[in-house]
Image (cartoon, rainbow, N blue to C red):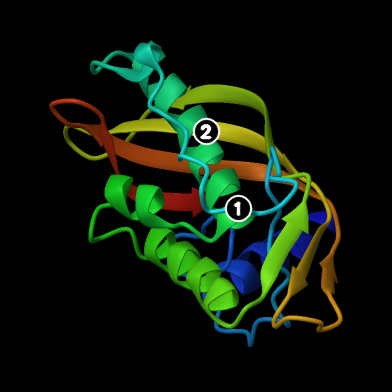
Amino acid sequence: MRASRWRRSLVAVAAAGLLGFGTSACTSGDDPPKPAPLPTESPSPTGSSSEAPPSLPADAGGSSTRAAKAFARHFVDLVNYASATGDVEAINAVASDSCRVCRGMADGIQDVYSKGGHLEGDGWRVLGTKVLSGGRENERAISLTLLVSSQRRYEKPNSEPIVSDEIRGILDIYMRSTENSWTISRLVQS
């Protein structure tokens, strides 16, 4: 039952383009339930867009396993920043054109904020990382165990919030090392 709720929540969030963990390009054919967006790890008290997005940590440079793990954690910081501010530019900058889930998340966040709405919550928190084998050529895969706290999504100013439950699950991030950073090729909920 818990795994089913996790999958439905992730599919719904990703399908709505909100802060979902991601699902593979293949999802179930079921109609997803009403989406509940996911929160920010370090929420801004004001949601001010004057804040700068998180900088790439020094240990995320290069193509080592250590760098890939650091970048995966950095991606969580970017998602948290975007949900707190509505600024999705940093997510789009690290997502390849083929990462439909990345683009869907960014579009969903942008949609909420463009209507004058906002997201509130305590965010995604990384509980653990694991290196996966079996990625595509020149691709690193890092599995993150995440805790996503309850979130409130306000669709418009003064609207009643849509509240999501806390969710614990696994997000696999497939990425390729670039000259100065990493590019995410796909996100898969496992």
Determine whether the residue tagged by mark 1 lies in a helix, strand or loop: loop
Please determine whether, in this image, residue 169 is positioned above or below residue 129: below
Please determine whether, in this image, residue 62 is positioned above or below residue 11: above
Name the residue rendered at 43%, 57% in the picture. Answer: 88
Name the residue rendered at 65%, 24% in the picture. Answer: 128
Q: Left or right: where does residue 7 sit relative to residue 152? A: left
Q: Residue 90 or 174: which is nearer the viewer?
A: 90
Residues at circles 2 and 1 in contact by the CB criterion of under 8 Å: no
* Residue under pointer 1: 48
As drawn, the label of residue 137 is none
Name the residue rendered at 38%, 12% in the picture. Answer: 59
Q: Amino acid at mark 2?
A: Ser
N-terminal of the pair, mark 2 or mark 1, is 1
Crowding at label 2, few (<14), some or many (≥20) Cα neighbours within 10 Å? many
Q: Is residue 171 visible?
A: yes
* Residue under pointer 2: 143
Q: Left or right: where does residue 141 sit relative to residue 2? A: left
Determine whether the residue tagged by mark 2 lies in a helix, strand or loop: strand
Name the residue rendered at 70%, 63% in the picture. Answer: 119
Q: Amino acid at mark 1?
A: Ser
Q: Residue 4 or 106: which is nearer the viewer?
A: 106
Please state the horizontal and vertical placement of residue 161, each as a whole percent of the image.
Answer: 84, 75
Please state the horizontal and vertical placement of residue 87, each as a whole percent of the image.
Answer: 47, 57
Q: Residue 158 or 58: which is nearer the viewer?
A: 158
Q: Left or right: where does residue 49 sit relative to residue 147? A: left
Please state the horizontal and vertical placement of residue 123, each as a whole percent of the image.
Answer: 71, 45
Crowding at label 1, few (<14), some or many (≥20) Cα neighbours within 10 Å? few
Q: Residue furthest left?
A: 179
